[in-house]
Image: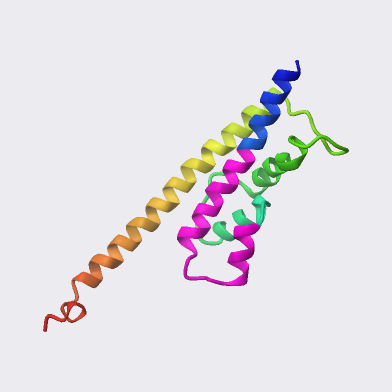
Amino acid sequence: MAVKLEIINGTASLCVQSAEKFLKAVIEHCFVEESSDEIMHLLRTHNLRPLYNKISSKYQFSITSRDCKWLGGFYFDARCPGDNFVVVTEEDAIECLEILEKLKEDTEKILNQEKEKRHNAKAALKGLKCFWGQY
């Protein structure tokens, strides 16, 4: 039973960490122009909701802020024994994986949109003769 508990709790913890990485990848790639204290703070936080809230102000997600709050609740509580330690159920672990899969798909979509937008902007600049010194 202890091994199963470690695996299930470990799954939830890893899902939280992976979700954090996905969200921070979007912050790094899509908010580079905003080199503000807010962005630096977001890149240092482990709280999924502020990351989600910043990104959702500009992009659409198939997950919700509530999903991020629920998933983020496992960050310490499923890993670290203590007063707030939780035993993650198998159903909760599956839900964590489902949220993570949706977030992965959302992240890929957002990053691809941003890549295409930058490619189009670069192509438009290349089309300007004066930009390349060709008068």
**Residue 117 visible in the snapshot:** yes
Estimate the x, y position of residue 45 in percent, counting from the top left: 66, 56
**Magenta highlight range:** 15-44
Q: Residue at x 39, y 58 (%)?
A: 114
Estimate the x, y position of residue 24 in percent, counting from the top left: 55, 54
- 65 relative to 14, above or below: below
Figure label count: 0
- 72 relative to 27, above or below: above
| Residue 85 counted in the magenta span | no
Left or right of residue 91, residue 29 in this image? left
Q: How is the image coloured?
A: rainbow
Q: Residue at x 62, y 60 (%)?
A: 42
Left or right of residue 105, residue 5 in this image? right
Question: Furthest-right residue in view?
Answer: 83
Question: Furthest-top residue in view?
Answer: 1
Estimate the x, y position of residue 19 in percent, counting from the top left: 58, 44
Q: Main secondary structure of the magenta part?
A: helix
Quadrant occupied by the N terminus? top right
Question: Furthest-left residue in view?
Answer: 135
Query: Residue 51's image quarter?
Result: bottom right
- 101 relative to 109, above or below: above
Q: Residue at x 34, y 61 (%)?
A: 117
Left or right of residue 30, residue 98 in this image? right
Looking at the picture, tell me which residue is in the foreground, 84 or 2: 2
